[in-house]
Amino acid sequence: MFATIYQKYKPYYKENLHLALPIVGSQVGHTLVHMADSIIVGHFTDTTQLAAVSLVNSIFILILVIGLGISYGLTPLIAQENGRQNYEECGRLLSNSLIINVLIGIVLYCLVHFGVLLVIDHLDQTPAVVSYAKPYLGLLSVSIIPLLIFQTFKQFAEGLGFTKQAMFVSIWGNALNITLGIIFVKGMFGIKPMGVSGVGWSTLIDRLLMATVMCIYVLRSKHFKKYLTHFRITFIDKVRAIKIIKIGAPVAMQYSFEISAFSGAAVLIGTIGATEQAAHQIAISLAAMTYMMASGVASAATIKTGTNFGKKNFDDLRKSAIASYHVILLFMTCSAIIFVLAHNFMPFIYTEDLSVVAIAAQLLIIAGFFQLFDGTQVVGLGVLRGLGDVNIPTFITFLAYWVVGIPVGYLLGFKFNLGVNGIWYGLTFGLLTASVLLFLRFQNKTRTLKESN
C-alpha cells in the first residue's frame, strides 16, 4: 500500500521538497534568533535573565506574528498572478506590500513602546525578571521594521519560486547574530558585558543587514526584471492594498490566535515561578524549531497551491497538497521520537540549572506528543491560504486555541493542580482541534474544486 501511495505522489514529493527545503532554512532563521538568544543568555548569565528572555519572547512573538502574517498576504497573490503569467501585476503588488509592511512595522513599534512596555509591570511577574526584560523588548521592537522589509522581498521572491536566496541570507544573518550575541552578552574585545540587552543589539544589527541584502538582491537580480517593470516605491493602489490586507490580516489573526495562546500560557506559567518560566522557554523554543520547519513546508504548499489555482489545475493542486501532508507527517513523527527519547538531555543545551532541566524534560515529552498536530495544522493553513481561503480557518484557530486550548490548560494547570504540565496538556488539545478541523476544511474545498472542474 505504501509503495502505491509513494509512486502516485512521488513527483509531488520532489517538487514540494525542492521548493520547501530552502524555505524551511529561511523560516527556521526566525526561530534561531530567539533560540540563540536563549542559549547565549542561559549559558553566560543566570536563570533570572533566561526567564526575562522567556517573558519577552512570549510577548514579542505575539507582536511579531502580526507583521509576519500581513507580509504573508503577498505570497499567494504573487503565485496566482505568476500562474496566470500576469507578470506586470507582480511588481505592482510588491510596491503595495512594501509600503503596507513598513507602515505596519512602525505601528507595531509604537504599540510596544507606548503600550506593552507600560503593561509589562502589571503582569504579576517577578520584578527582577521584568527589569531585565524591558530593555531587551525595546531593542526587539525597533528590529520589527527592518525585519518586515526583509519579509516583503523574501515573500515576493518565494512566491515566484525563488526560495534559496532568502535561506542563505538567513543563515549568514544568524551566524552574525550568534557571534555578536556572545560578544555583547559576555563582554569581549573591550566591550562591557551587556547581559540580556546584548542579544537585543545583535538581533537588531542582524535584521538591518538582512533587509539591506534581500532588497538589493531582488531589485538587481536578472530573474525579476520582467516582474519589476511596474514596481515603484511610491506606488500605492487602494484595490491592491485591500487585496493584500484581505489575505494578510486573517493570516496575521491566525498566527496571533495560536501564538497568543502560547504567550498566554507563558504568562500563566510565570505566575507559578521563574524556574517554571525558564523551563517553559527551553521547551517552547525547541518545539518552535520544529514548528518553523513545518511552517516552511506549509509556505511551499501555499506557493504550489496558489500557482496551480492560478492555472486552474485542480487535480495537481489536490495531489500536491496531500503530498505536503505526507511529508509533514513523516517529519513530525521523527521529531516526536527525538523529543521523547532525548528529553533528559536536550535542556542542557540551554542551561545547567538542574531544577530548570527537570521541568523542561517533562514538557519535552508533552511536546513530542503534539508534534503531529502542530505540523498538520500549519500545513492545512498553508494550503487553504494558497486558495485564498482565510476567513473560516481564522475562526478555526480562534476556536482551537482560545475556546479549547487555554481554558483546558488553565483548568488542568490550576484547578486540577497539574501546574505547568497541565497548561501544556491544554495547548495539546488546542493543536489537536485545529489539526482536525483544518484538514476537514481542506478536504471539502479541494474536492469541490476538483469536481467542479
Image (cartoon, helix red, strand yellow):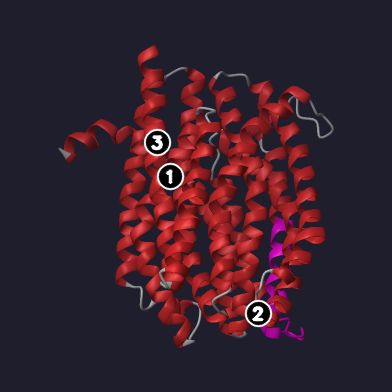
Judge by depth and name the residue closer to the eye, 447 or 233: 447
Judge by depth and name the residue closer to the eye, 130 or 223: 130
For marks 1 and 3 on the same chain, the one whose residue lies earlier in the sequence: 3
Label 2 neighbour load within 10 Å: few <14, some 14-19, many 20+: some
Q: Is residue 92 magenta?
A: no
Which element is circle 2 on?
A: loop
Residue, disc 3:
15
Q: Is residue 196 magenta?
A: yes
Q: On residue 197, which mark appears?
A: none
In the figure, residue 119 lies in which quadrant?
Answer: bottom right
Specify whether 219 is left or right of 31. Answer: right
Find the distance from the CA under tag 1 to the CA under tag 3.
27 Å
Q: In the image, residue 432 lies at what x, y percent?
A: 38, 49
Residue, disc 2:
126
Q: In the image, residue 214 lies at what x, y percent?
A: 68, 47
Q: In the image, residue 427 lies at what x, y percent?
A: 45, 58
Magenta span dominant secondary structure: helix
